[in-house]
Image (cartoon, rainbow, N blue to C red):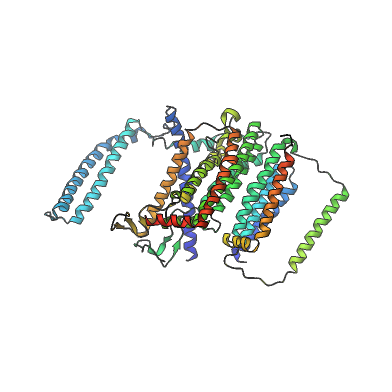
């Protein structure tokens, strides 16, 4: 592999990770959480942010609606005619028209898509006109408005505080959360020289191979824990540097809670390492692609439930949000922060939510693995079927489907975390610590022991073999 | 050492020295702890130049994630009276400390300067998780377990001393 390809692909991957996490997931998450809380409490919520268009533009949009409607109708009629013709050909097997069938199919897809797009455009234009020129994308402009507010808000620094540490706190909290994405694989390896071909299902493929993750480290998931552990210091020193008793208490709570739950977070994943026999995340994904998803193993399912509990505690979210519990500590270690520094804490929290969702997806739900999707395309085959329905796909389409499915899995976990956020009341502090040290910790140690017994007695191999045959 | 490795070493070495100086010289304890954090992270970077990825990760996990957090925790619990302490010490003790530091520095510098042993090629699994695991559990199992038990005894002892017998 040439150095230029390596460098360019690395830069592209880093940009992709940043765009997906910081650029897309975190702002949308902030919006989704506020929107959800508004719905539960029967408020309007963040749906009013808008870009206001000038009246002349509104008049123009109003004029453009009629041609769009006509275009929709015309293309729609053509598409329906093409659909009838294609159906005729498919049913009768003969083509009485002078136009070839391939052209008919292309016309059906092309005119159908154009029709749908014109109808959507007509609806959107109508909405803009009805709102007197305000463009509101479901309130998705709110993150943008929030960002602008964060940047231009007064950046208050408590006068007697340690100003350097006060500024360093949010940075130390945010950077590890983003750095964790360096080892997360978004898809299986990309064979650059064969990107437009259908690859064989198994076996080695010659040519340039690009792993779909920023860094392929031998320590793998330990890297995530290593950088995440430095994030604790961010919350702790910002609580101390704020020169505020509430902040200090919040910082102490945050530090002890995160240190405690980090132990559990690591131990709950150990049975998964024992099954996959690797710490590399790409190897874990590959194992699950070849065998079965980790969640189908009962011990790993138990590990997943404990991991998810510990993960929510580690991100300091409800019901474990004691470091910032507003009824006791005003805002905890966030009390004195405003403007972009507060925004960085917020961002860090949501990036961490995405990162933990990604880890859960990789370790227990097959990472980029899609059911019935292999390297050469789809093969829908069930145990009782003699032969599967094979849909060969080009390599880049397979990779794109894998990336999309992986992001979808992350979205599911995020949705689950948001649902928990508004469903459960806050724990008491001693309950939180009891859950960690007397509940989850012994249980995860027992889980490791049981998994060791299963592996050494050969039960696990038999179970995996049984799942493989299905 | 290759070009990239040498660059990484120089950068991490500079940061390690800066971090160590901050740790020693900072008046505020929390800033000293942050200096220690910088030092530890640069040490982890230096382990990377030696192809010891696992050791670098564990350095971050244990020292940055646990030890520094513990220091920060203790400083936070003690509170603001720990902010600034007068630097005590007489001329004799200060000059003795300075002379000792100089002596250690000279010994290390001469021994590194006089180093002429041949470079040894390492195995492919050197520094990997698998390599270290095999080394510990095949070649040094008894010492490893003894260390574990010593640590356990120390933890139990600390709890026994810290909690009063009436409880």
- Taking the image as shown, residue A294 lies to the left or right of residue A381, namely right
Percent position of residue A116, x then y: 27, 43
- Taking the image as shown, residue A298 lies to the left or right of residue A63, namely right
Is there any visible trace of residue A179 in the rendered image? no
Q: In the rendered image, which quarter is residue A136 located in?
A: top left
| Residue sitting nearer the eye, B167 or A104 | B167
Percent position of residue B85, x then y: 78, 40
Image point (27%, 36%), residue name? A63
> Height in image: B43 above or below A312?
below
Percent position of residue B146, x then y: 69, 56
Is there any visible trace of residue B6 in the rendered image? yes
Image point (72%, 44%), residue name? B158
Q: How many marks?
A: 0
| Residue sitting nearer the eye, B100 or B165 | B165
Q: Quadrant of the C terminus of chain A?
A: bottom left
- Taking the image as shown, residue B107 lies to the left or right of residue B62, namely right
Image point (43%, 52%), residue name? A293
> Height in image: A426 above or below A350?
above
Q: Residue furthest front?
A: A457
Percent position of residue A422, x then y: 47, 33
| Residue sitting nearer the eye, B2 or A205 | A205
> Height in image: B24 above or below A151?
below
| Residue sitting nearer the eye, A84 or A229 | A229
Q: Residue furthest left?
A: A96
């Amino acid at each position: 592999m040439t150095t230029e390809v390596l460098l360019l692909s690395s830069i592209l991957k880093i940009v992709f990770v940043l765009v997906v996490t910081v650029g897309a997931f975190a702002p949308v998450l902030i919006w989704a959480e506020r929107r959800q809380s508004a719905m539960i409490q029967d408020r309007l919520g963040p749906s009013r942010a808008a870009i206001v268009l000038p009246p002349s533009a509104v008049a123009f949009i109003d004029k453009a609606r009629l041609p769009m409607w006509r275009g929709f109708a015309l293309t729609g009629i053509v598409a329906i005619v093409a659909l009838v013709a294609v159906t005729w050909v498919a049913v009768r097997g003969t083509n009485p028209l002078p136009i070839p069938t391939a052209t008919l199919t292309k016309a059906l897809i092309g005119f159908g898509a154009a029709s749908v797009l014109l109808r959507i455009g007509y609806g959107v234009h109508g909405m803009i006109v009805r709102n007197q020129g305000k463009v509101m994308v479901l309130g998705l402009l709110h993150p943008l408005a929030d960002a602008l507010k964060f940047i231009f808000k007064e950046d208050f620094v408590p006068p007697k505080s340690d100003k350097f540490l006060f500024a360093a706190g949010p940075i130390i909290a945010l950077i590890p959360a983003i750095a964790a994405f360096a080892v997360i694989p978004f898809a299986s390896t990309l064979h650059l020289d064969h990107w437009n071909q259908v690859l064989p299902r198994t076996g080695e493929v010659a040519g340039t191979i690009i792993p779909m993750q920023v860094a392929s480290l031998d320590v793998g998931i330990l890297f995530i824990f290593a950088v995440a552990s430095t994030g604790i210091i961010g919350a702790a020193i910002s609580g101390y540097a704020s020169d505020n008793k509430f902040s200090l208490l919040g910082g102490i709570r945050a530090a002890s809670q995160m240190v405690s739950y980090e132990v559990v977070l690591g131990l709950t994943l150990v049975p998964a390492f024992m099954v996959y026999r690797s710490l590399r995340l790409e190897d874990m994904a590959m194992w699950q692609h070849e065998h079965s998803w980790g969640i189908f193993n009962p011990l790993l399912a138990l590990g997943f439930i404990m991991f998810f509990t510990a993960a929510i505690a580690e991100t300091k979210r409800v019901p474990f949000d004691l470091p910032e519990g507003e009824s006791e500590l005003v805002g905890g270690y966030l009390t004195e922060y405003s403007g972009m520094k507060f925004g960085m804490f917020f961002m860090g929290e949501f990036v961490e939510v995405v990162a933990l969702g990604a880890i859960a997806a990789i370790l227990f739900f097959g990472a980029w693995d899609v059911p019935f999707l292999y390297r050469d395309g789809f093969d829908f085959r069930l145990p009782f079927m003699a032969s599967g329905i094979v849909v060969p796909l080009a390599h880049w389409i397979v990779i794109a489907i894998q990336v999309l499915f992986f992001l979808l899995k992350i979205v599911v976990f995020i949705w689950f975390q948001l649902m928990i956020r508004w469903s459960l009341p806050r724990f008491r502090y001693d309950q939180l610590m009891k859950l960690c040290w007397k509940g989850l910790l012994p249980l995860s140690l027992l889980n490791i022991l049981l998994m060791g017994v299963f592996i050494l007695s050969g039960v696990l191999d038999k179970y995996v073999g049984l799942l493989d045959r299905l | 050492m290759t070009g990239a490795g040498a660059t990484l070493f120089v950068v991490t070495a500079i940061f390690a020295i800066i971090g160590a100086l901050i740790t020693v010289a900072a008046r505020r304890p929390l800033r000293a702890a942050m200096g220690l954090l910088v030092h530890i992270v640069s040490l982890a970077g230096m382990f990377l130049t030696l192809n010891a990825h696992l050791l670098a990760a564990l350095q971050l996990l244990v020292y940055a994630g646990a030890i520094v957090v513990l220091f920060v925790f203790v400083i936070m619990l003690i509170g603001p009276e720990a902010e600034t302490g007068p630097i005590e010490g007489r001329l004799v003790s200060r000059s003795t400390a300075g002379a000792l530091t100089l002596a250690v520095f000279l010994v290390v510098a001469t021994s590194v300067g006089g180093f002429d042993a041949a470079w040894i090629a390492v195995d492919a699994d050197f520094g990997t998780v698998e390599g270290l695991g095999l080394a510990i559990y095949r070649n040094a199992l008894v010492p490893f377990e003894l260390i574990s038990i010593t640590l356990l005894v120390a933890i139990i002892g600390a709890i026994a001393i810290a909690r009063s017998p009436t409880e």
